[in-house]
């Protein structure tokens, strides 16, 4: 946080860059008066500036781009915001608007001087520091100067109107995804899910941005969390320089000729500038404050009286590799985080699947099984664990699961199917009775989709039906020779210990036996 005297000096240059010889008609001047106000210095409480704001009168101006009164000092701006780094022959500044493009309002053309800073939204006057949460004055119930509050709502209307003119969030998001895929393929590849999932994520982000623009604290906090999530996906802010340009083109491409107006241009330019800044802050904070993902329950199925399969959709992109686990927090037990294996398919969508068995009526597992419904929210930590497939196909795979330990191995089978991996994989699933094969249909279908995968259920008690009977270790020993395989184990702690010893007696080297440490 900057000192108070620095905060008092941190005001914004607004209205710079209009060519002195540009001619504006009276009609245009009236229209641009409110656009000019978008970039005026703000003294709302979130900006931390003292003193009472003078009464603001919006009036037509003859030269809306020329600064009125004395020029204010602006604090130092980062290199990307000052236009010092040219990342692309056509990129002009951080707002993502292209060099040489004349921004149109009706039939009138006006071009800002190259490198001129974009106007800043009211409520965000400090360019590099989070707005402090200060006490609210009696005259402003939400901590905002009423005039600045009105300007934020005006900018919000401009974003909403232009998004509607461009075809709506989904159409704009699809054009944005395609543009980013062509310009920066590795950027999109770092996000979980397939094309439809990424388009939906971008559409939700655009909708959220427009809906929350008039709530600066929420906007700053939300974009900071997005920056932390993108950092977890190994997307650094420096790789996002072209997003602003791609967004502008995605908006313009959906509009009829002449609909892309100067006030739309200014509103999106200023908004993207701030979004980029807060994403950068969030990414930097993630280095010492690990991100946490809020997620919504989108499916909850009780497969057994004490067991549920739960699917979650994180609000922000959450990276994980098949075979990993994450820690879960439920609202009724905020101090407890319990680890669960992830059975999702990150190449297909952004869903996370949990297989949860409740051994008692209390605790996180019981809350997830007995007291969780579709629409409820939980929180997830960063994915952990090294029980993942090697990047390069090598040895064939042996997988052995006990009870809900089948979840991470289901994820490994899904990865084999999605990538067309040529390795052979055999999954032994040991259960007590036929009723415990709660996910056999989906797992068998996944195995059929893979090139060389087999599922062998093993029932230890009662009628085994069409499956093998006895102990899973005996079934593994009778099935074949495994000394040259990579082995993955998942299940209860006692099962892990007994199976590891049995495999070593069968000639499997300890370094080829993979499982997460029991907790």
Image (spheres, grey):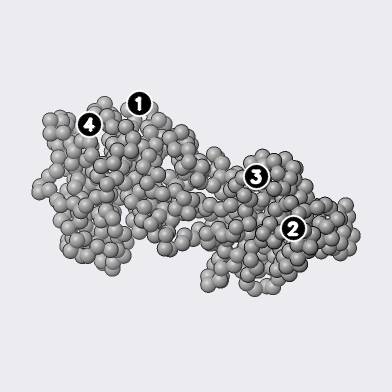
Q: Residue 175: horizontal and vertical position, in percent?
A: 46, 34
Q: Residue at x 44, y 38 (%)?
A: 184
Q: Which residue is mark 4?
A: 110
Q: CA distance from mark 4 to mark 1?
A: 16 Å
Q: Residue 183: horizontal and vertical position, in percent?
A: 43, 35
Q: Which residue is mark 1?
A: 257
Q: Residue at x 51, y 46 (%)?
A: 191
Mark positioned earlier in the residue sequence (1 or 2): 1
Say which of marks 1 and 3 sits in front. 3
Q: CA distance from mark 4 to mark 3?
A: 57 Å
Q: CA distance from mark 4 to mark 2?
A: 73 Å
Q: Residue at x 63, y 50 (%)?
A: 389
Q: Which residue is mark 3?
A: 393
- Label 1 neighbour load within 10 Å: few <14, some 14-19, many 20+: few
Dividing the picture into quarters, in which one does residue 483 lie? bottom right
Q: CA distance from mark 2 to mark 3?
A: 19 Å
Q: Residue 170: horizontal and vertical position, in percent?
A: 48, 39
Decide: is 105 above or below 190.
above
Q: Which residue is mark 2?
A: 508
Q: Residue at x 41, y 34 (%)?
A: 250
* Secondary structure type for disc 1: loop
Say which of marks 4 and 2 sits in front. 2
- Judging depth in this view, the residue of 172 and 117 nearest the camera is 117
Say which of marks 2 and 3 sits in front. 2
Dividing the picture into quarters, in which one does residue 445 lie? top right
Screen quadrant of the N terminus = bottom left
- Judging depth in this view, the residue of 511 and 349 nearest the camera is 511
In the picture, measured across the screen, residue 339 lies left or right of residue 400, that is left
């Amino acid at each position: 946080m900057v000192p108070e005297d620095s905060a008092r000096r941190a005001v914004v240059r607004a209205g710079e860059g209009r060519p002195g010889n540009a001619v504006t008609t009276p009609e245009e001047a009236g229209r641009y008066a409110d656009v000019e106000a978008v970039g005026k210095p703000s003294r709302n409480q979130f900006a931390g500036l003292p003193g009472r704001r003078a009464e603001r009168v919006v009036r037509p101006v003859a030269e809306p781009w020329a600064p009125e009164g004395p020029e204010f000092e602006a604090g130092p701006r980062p290199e990307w915001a000052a236009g010092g780094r040219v990342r692309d022959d056509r990129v002009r500044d951080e707002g993502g608007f292209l060099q040489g493009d004349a921004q149109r309002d009706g039939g009138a053309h006006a071009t800002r001087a190259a490198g001129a800073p974009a106007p800043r939204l009211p409520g965000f006057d400090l360019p590099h520091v989070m707005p402090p949460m200060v006490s609210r004055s009696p005259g402003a119930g939400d901590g905002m100067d009423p005039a600045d509050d009105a300007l934020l709502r005006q900018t919000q209307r401009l974003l909403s109107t232009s998004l509607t003119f461009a075809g709506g969030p989904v159409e704009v998001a699809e054009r944005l995804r395609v543009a980013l895929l062509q310009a920066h393929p590795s950027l999109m590849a770092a996000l979980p899910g397939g094309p439809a999932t990424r388009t939906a994520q971008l559409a939700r982000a655009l909708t959220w941005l427009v809906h929350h623009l008039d709530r600066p604290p929420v906007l700053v906090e939300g974009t900071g969390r997005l920056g932390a999530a993108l950092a977890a996906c190994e997307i650094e802010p420096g790789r996002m320089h072209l997003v602003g340009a791609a967004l502008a083109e995605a908006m313009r491409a959906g509009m009829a000729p002449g609909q892309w107006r100067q006030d739309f241009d200014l509103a999106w330019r200023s908004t993207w500038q701030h979004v980029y800044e807060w994403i950068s802050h969030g990414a930097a904070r993630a280095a010492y404050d690990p991100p946490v993902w809020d997620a919504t329950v989108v499916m909850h199925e009780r497969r057994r009286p004490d067991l549920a399969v739960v699917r979650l959709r994180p609000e922000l992109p959450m990276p994980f590799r098949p075979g990993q686990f994450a820690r879960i927090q439920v609202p009724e037990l905020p101090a407890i985080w319990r680890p669960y294996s992830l059975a999702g398919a990150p190449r297909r969508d952004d869903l996370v699947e949990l297989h949860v068995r409740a051994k008692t009526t209390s605790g996180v597992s019981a809350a997830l099984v007995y007291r969780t419904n579709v629409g409820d929210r939980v929180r997830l930590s960063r994915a952990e664990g090294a029980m993942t497939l090697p990047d390069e196909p090598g040895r064939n795979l042996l997988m052995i699961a006990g009870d809900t330990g089948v979840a991470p191995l289901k994820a490994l089978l899904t990865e084999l199917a999605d990538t067309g991996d040529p390795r052979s994989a055999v999954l032994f699933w040991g259960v007590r009775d036929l009723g415990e094969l709660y996910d056999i249909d989906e797992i068998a279908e996944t195995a059929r989709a893979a090139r060389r995968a087999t599922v062998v259920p093993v029932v230890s008690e009662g009628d085994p039906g069409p499956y093998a009977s006895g102990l899973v270790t005996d079934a593994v020993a009778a099935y074949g020779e495994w000394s040259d395989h990579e082995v993955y184990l998942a299940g209860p702690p006692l099962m892990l210990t007994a199976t590891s010893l049995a495999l070593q007696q069968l000639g499997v080297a300890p370094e080829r036996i993979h499982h997460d440490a029991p907790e």
